[in-house]
Image: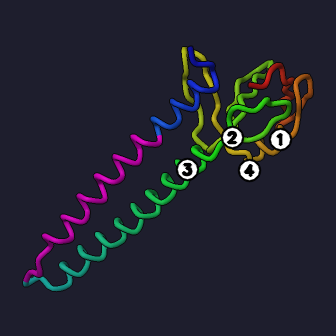
Amino acid sequence: MKNLRDKIYDHCMLVLKERHAVLRQEWQNLQQAAASETKSSMGDKYETGREMLNLEKQKMATQLNEVSRQLKEMEALAFGRLNHFVQPGVVVETDKQVFFLAIPLGKIKVDGQEVFVLSAQSPLGLAMLQKKEGDTFGFGAQIYVIQTLT
């Protein structure tokens, strides 16, 4: 049976792979739209439409690159070693919230439990890095007590 960390990891990977597939399909649709764009007698209207397609393609390429980078980052997380302190790839259960230090994905639900998936470079991620069970960390007006690390 999978532990909570494995379930969270699998859920994050599923979300990223679905996002990647949608973006790739949208990219292909834009490619087809650009290929079928024909010059009309309207001149400037053609150029404006073509430029808008190019801007959409650039935006889509940026999003695709970001999702690809996040997938690689997730795949690079080290599992299998004991987690004595907060580091990327660790599930941090506090008195208020469960966190998974990985990529900036936000709130997800796994087995009915709300988990906040965040980057180690985020302000909250930085606040908890290198802490261990029983330590506290603060963010804004909140003080969190780390109960378990998995």
Residue drawn at point x = 53 percent, y = 35 percent = 12
Q: Residues within 10 Å of mark 1 (few under 14, many from 20)?
A: some
Which residues, given as a range, are shown in magenta? 16-40
Left/right of residue 68 with respect to residue 106 in the rendered view: left
Check disc 3 and report its element: helix, strand or loop: helix
Pick whichever of labels 3 and 1 is earlier in the sequence: 3
Label 4 sits on residue = 121
Circle 2 is placed at which residue position?
Answer: 78
Residue beneath disc 3: 70
Between the residue at mark 3 and the residue at mark 1, the CA separation in whole angstroms equals: 19 Å
Q: Residue at x 57, y 32 (%)?
A: 9
For the residue labelled by badge 4, is the local secondary structure a helix, a strand or a loop?
A: loop
Point out residue 64 in the picture as x, y percentages from the top left corner.
Answer: 43, 57
Q: Is residue 74 above or below residue 46?
A: above
- Residue 46 vertical position relative to residue 77 in the rendered view, above or below: below
Residue receiving disc 1: 129
C-beta proximity under 8 Å, tags 3 and 4: no
Which badge, 1 or 4, is on the more N-terminal residue? 4
| Element carrying mark 2 | loop
Distance Cα–Cα, label 4 vs label 2:
17 Å
3D distance between C-alphas at marks 2 and 3? 15 Å
Mark 4 or mark 2, which is nearer to you? Answer: 2
Q: Earlier in the sequence, mark 2 or mark 3?
A: 3
In front of the other: 62 or 73: 73
Magenta stretch: dominant secondary structure: helix
